[in-house]
Image: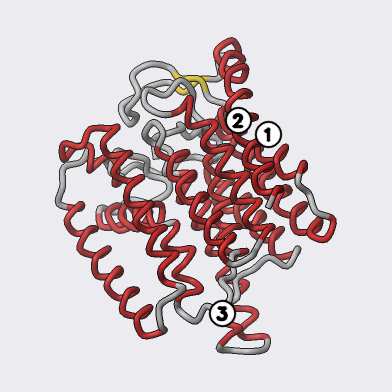
Amino acid sequence: MSSIWIAFVIALLASLILTVPLRRFALRAGIVDQPNARKVHVKPVPLLGGVAIYAAFVLAVVATLHDNTRAEILAILAGATLLAITGLLDDSGKLHHQIKLFLSMPLAACILLASGIHAQVFTDFLPGKTGTLLDVVLTLFWVVGVTAAFSILDHLDGLCAGIAAVAAAFFTIAAFLNGQILVCTLAAATLGASLGFLRWNFSPAKIFMGDGGAMLLGFLMATLGLKLRPVGAHFPADWLLPTLILIVPVFDTTLITISRLRRGLLPFTSPGKDHTAHRLSNLGFGHKGAVLALYGLGCVGGALALLVTYLPSLASYVLAGVLALGGAAAVIALERSPYERQDKAPAAPLASLNPTRSH
């Protein structure tokens, strides 16, 4: 129990404090995100916030490291380091954006698989090689999907860090209720690192986390989802739990994927102001109101996630169906709402640079 609080406090203070000098360094070194037509900020904003989040998480985890879980923790840190570095290179314009999606994210997932961290969905129904292979594929899809979802969620002040904090809080509660101290500690460290940074990132943002921070948080969320195993949970509650906790990035990614494919655009390589938050802002919420509304949605999803493990199997299926129908209706409604439409862009050459915070 003490390790949970220690991880949270260390991560919170480290992120809160380290962000200040990193912001000053970014300004002096010219590591800033320049405004353009596809972004909502109008002045250059320093990057490198992701470095503070990464350092805070690592410090918290190392301080509470347990010998019996060393292999898994080292794998998580290795994947987190890979994505933080990849994102940092992407932020500085030294890396093509497709490398992170098709190389770095799958490689981070493979690191988790090598340490024994993987999904356990199909093996419950298909024992043997077939079930194992399908769970490996699901693990790759989950890690890449959630990491990518967070990498494109960082488009309004305080959105990505706040959603990560909300999700981490519910992961912490769920893990604690199920007696998973390691998962609870990792979630608490992620919560502290996100909240500490959010102090400087909430509207009006004084610093951005950059792709390094967004990918890092996405990877940690995906890992927590794989590690969280509700005691005695039945299908589909076991997979509904992490999905509901991550309801905001899951919904937002679904919305833009459907919307952009309908317009002949590639979802993850066609940046624009067509995300859920952008549409809510155009409906009258404003930027800050849209962010707070999505915080609220994250809390609703987290509360349902805690509830679903106590429901009988049939009720879980009913809930899943209701949520699917509600999500489809929300996608249709938001598709009809006003947003800034981007033109179909030609494929970028490998040497081109992708702008940050314009997903």
Task: For mark 1, give the secondary structure.
Answer: helix
Instruction: Give the residue type that dot 2 points to.
Output: Ser
Q: How many angstroms separate mark 1 from mark 3 (CA)?
A: 35 Å
Which residue lies under the disc numbered 3? 232
Which residue lies under the disc numbered 1? 55
Whether residues under marks 2 and 3 lie with C-beta atoms below 8 angstroms apart, the answer is no
Whether residues under marks 2 and 1 lie with C-beta atoms below 8 angstroms apart, the answer is yes
- N-terminal of the two: label 2 or label 1? 2
Residue 70 to residue 288: above or below: below
Instruction: Give the residue type that dot 3 points to.
Output: Gly
Residue at point 41%, 83% (across, down): 312
Task: For mark 3, give the secondary structure.
Answer: loop
So how many labels did they put on this image?
Answer: 3
Which residue lies under the disc numbered 2? 15
Query: Which x, y percent locates residue 65?
Result: 78, 49
Category of crowding for the residue at label 1, using alpha-carbon neighbours closer than 10 angstroms: few (below 14), some (14–19), many (at least 20): some
Q: Which of 7/93 is in front? A: 7
In this rendering, would 205 be left or right of 61? left
